[in-house]
Image (tube, rainbow, N blue to C red):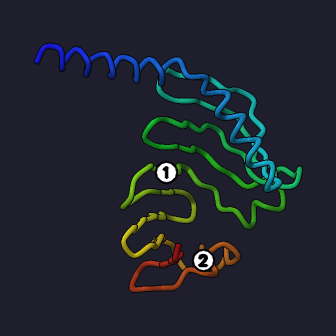
């Protein structure tokens, strides 16, 4: 029994040390390379590797070389991604609402939450039905202001719903 616990302990130590010492910046640059195939780039000023996460501050999202949005801070960890203060830039200010916080969890069920000047959006992943469902608690004035973004949302009761079949 003692041998079994020693093996489990060694596996846990190996796994933890692998995650802690893994070069997370290289993963970030690999993701940038993959996004560039779609003409999407992430321009970052400050990238810091933490033991179990990657912190990136003062970033811009570029679409075909043009700055589309700025991100004050985002964190990629083992369990979720967190984006803070996402704002559209220039002409995109009218089409991209300002998000105070966006959380993306790596799990089925509620996998995404966004909060901003538009209200609140919750994303749900249903694996059995092969659907992604976004429910937004927004006001009609916000829907009209960002009509390009919210045009596919349908009003169901007091929330707006958008479904994607996988």
The answer to whether residue 104 is left or right of residue 28 is left
Q: Which residue is mark 2?
A: 143
Quarter where residue 79 is shown: top left
Q: Position of residue 120 (x, y in %)?
A: 47, 63
Residue on which the image places disc 1: 104
| Category of crowding for the residue at label 1, using alpha-carbon neighbours closer than 10 angstroms: few (below 14), some (14–19), many (at least 20) | some
Neighbor class of circle 2 (other Cα within 10 Å; few <14, some 14-19, many 20+) is: some
Q: Please state, as top left, top right, bottom left or bottom right, where the N terminus lies in the image.
A: top left
Foreground label between 2 and 1: 1
Give the distance between the C-alpha atoms of the residues marked 2 and 1, in whole angstroms.
Answer: 23 Å
Circle 1 SS class: strand
Q: Is residue 13 above or below residue 79?
A: above
Residue 47 is labelled as: none
Residue name at image x 47 percent, y 26 percent = 52
Q: Residue furthest left?
A: 1
Whether pointer 2 and pointer 1 mark residues with C-beta atoms closer than 8 Å, the reply is no
Residue 68 on image: x %, y %: 79, 54
Q: Is residue 25 above or below residue 70?
A: above
Q: Nearer the viewer, residue 23 or 57?
A: 23
Residue sitting nearer the eye, 126 or 120: 126
Percent x, y for residue 154?
52, 85
Q: Earlier in the sequence, mark 2 or mark 1?
A: 1
Helix, strand or loop under label 2? helix
- Residue 116 at what x, y percent from top left? 55, 57
Q: Is residue 91 above or below residue 37?
A: below
Identified at 78% across, 51% down, the residue is 40
* Residue at left offset 48%, top offset 85%: 155
């Amino acid at each position: 029994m003692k041998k079994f616990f020693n093996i489990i302990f060694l596996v846990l130590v190996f796994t933890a040390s692998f995650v802690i010492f893994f070069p997370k910046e290289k993963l970030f640059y690999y993701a940038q390379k993959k996004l560039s195939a779609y003409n999407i780039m992430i321009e970052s000023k400050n990238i810091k590797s933490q033991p179990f996460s990657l912190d990136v501050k003062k970033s811009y999202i570029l679409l075909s070389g043009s700055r589309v949005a700025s991100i004050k801070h985002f964190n990629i960890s083992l369990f979720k991604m967190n984006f803070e203060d996402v704002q559209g830039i220039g002409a995109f200010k009218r089409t991209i609402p300002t998000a105070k916080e966006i959380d993306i969890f790596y799990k089925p069920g509620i996998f995404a939450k966004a909060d901003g000047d538009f209200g609140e959006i919750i994303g749900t992943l249903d694996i059995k039905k092969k659907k992604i469902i976004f429910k937004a608690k927004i006001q009609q004035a916000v829907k009209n202001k960002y009509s390009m973004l919210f045009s596919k949302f349908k009003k169901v009761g007091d929330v707006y719903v958008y479904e994607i079949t996988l």
